[in-house]
C-alpha cells in the first residue's frame, strides 16, 4: 500500500500488487467495466476497435453518452447487425442504455467502439487509456489492452 499524498484535505491511498493491473474500473453508482481490449493495428492505418463489458449493479439505469482516447481523433460507438444474410454497421445515436442490474457487452459482431484517426499503431501487449462518460456515474477511465485474440471467457469451476 502506498500513501501518495494529502491533496486538498483528501488522503490519497493506492494499493499495488506485483501483478499487472486488471482492466476493471469501478466508478460510483454501481457500474463496472471489465475486459476492455482492442485488436492490433499496424502503424499508418487509421481505424481500430475497442470492446468491453459494462455492468450496472445499481438499482437505477444509466447511459453511456460519450467515449474518447488520446490514441484516436474520434471514438464512436457503432453496432453491427445481420439483416438478410448481410452484415451492416451503423453509429449508435443518443447514447447506450445500461439497464439497472444488467450488463451490456460491447463485443465483436455487436456493439463496438470505432477508433477513427489513430495517431499510432496498436501493438499486441500494449495498453492505452479510454475515458467513458455516463449520464449518472460521470467519467470512468479504463485501460484497454491490445490483444491478438479475444480474452478467454470465464468458466465457473474451471481452473
Image (cartoon, grey):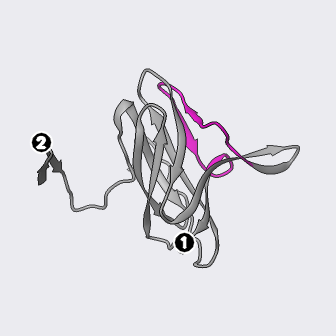
Q: Position of residue 69 (x, y in %)?
A: 49, 58
The residue wearing badge 2 is 9
Task: Specify the farthest residue to the right.
Answer: 84
Of marks 2 and 1, the one in the foreground: 2
**Identity of the residue drawn at 61% across and 67% down:** 117
Sequence-wise, the earlier of marks 2 and 1 is 2
Q: Circle 2 sits in a helix, a strand or a loop, which is it?
A: loop
The stretch drawn in magenta includes residue 134: no
In the image, taking residue 147 as reference, residue 41 lies left or right, namely right
Q: Circle 1 sits in a helix, a strand or a loop, which is it?
A: loop
Q: Position of residue 26 (x, y in %)?
A: 35, 41
**Identity of the residue drawn at 38% across and 31% down:** 30
The residue wearing badge 1 is 119
**Identity of the residue drawn at 54% across and 72% down:** 119
- The span from disc 2 to disc 1 (Cα, nearest Å) is 38 Å
Q: Position of residue 70 (x, y in %)?
A: 47, 63
In the drawing, what numbered circle is on residue 42?
Answer: none
Where are the magenta residues, as a range?
90-112
- Vertical comparison of 39 with 76: above or below: below
Most foreground residue, 157 or 114: 114
Most foreground residue, 16 or 89: 89
Most foreground residue, 145 or 130: 130
Amino acid at each position: 500500500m502506498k500513501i501518495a499524498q494529502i491533496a486538498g484535505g483528501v488522503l490519497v491511498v493506492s494499493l499495488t500488487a506485483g501483478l499487472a493491473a486488471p482492466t476493471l474500473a469501478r466508478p460510483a453508482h454501481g457500474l463496472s467495466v471489465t475486459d476492455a481490449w482492442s485488436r492490433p493495428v499496424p502503424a499508418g492505418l487509421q481505424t481500430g476497435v475497442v470492446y468491453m463489458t459494462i455492468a450496472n449493479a445499481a438499482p437505477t439505469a444509466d447511459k453511456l453518452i460519450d467515449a474518447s482516447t488520446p490514441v484516436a481523433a474520434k471514438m464512436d460507438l457503432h453496432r453491427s447487425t445481420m439483416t438478410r444474410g448481410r452484415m451492416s454497421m451503423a453509429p449508435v445515436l443518443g447514447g447506450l442504455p445500461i439497464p439497472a442490474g444488467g450488463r451490456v457487452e460491447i463485443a465483436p459482431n455487436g456493439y463496438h467502439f470505432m477508433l477513427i484517426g489513430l495517431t499510432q499503431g496498436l501493438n499486441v501487449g500494449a495498453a492505452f487509456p479510454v475515458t467513458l462518460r455516463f449520464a449518472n456515474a460521470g467519467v470512468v477511465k479504463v485501460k484497454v489492452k491490445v490483444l491478438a485474440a479475444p480474452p478467454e471467457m470465464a468458466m465457473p469451476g474451471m481452473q
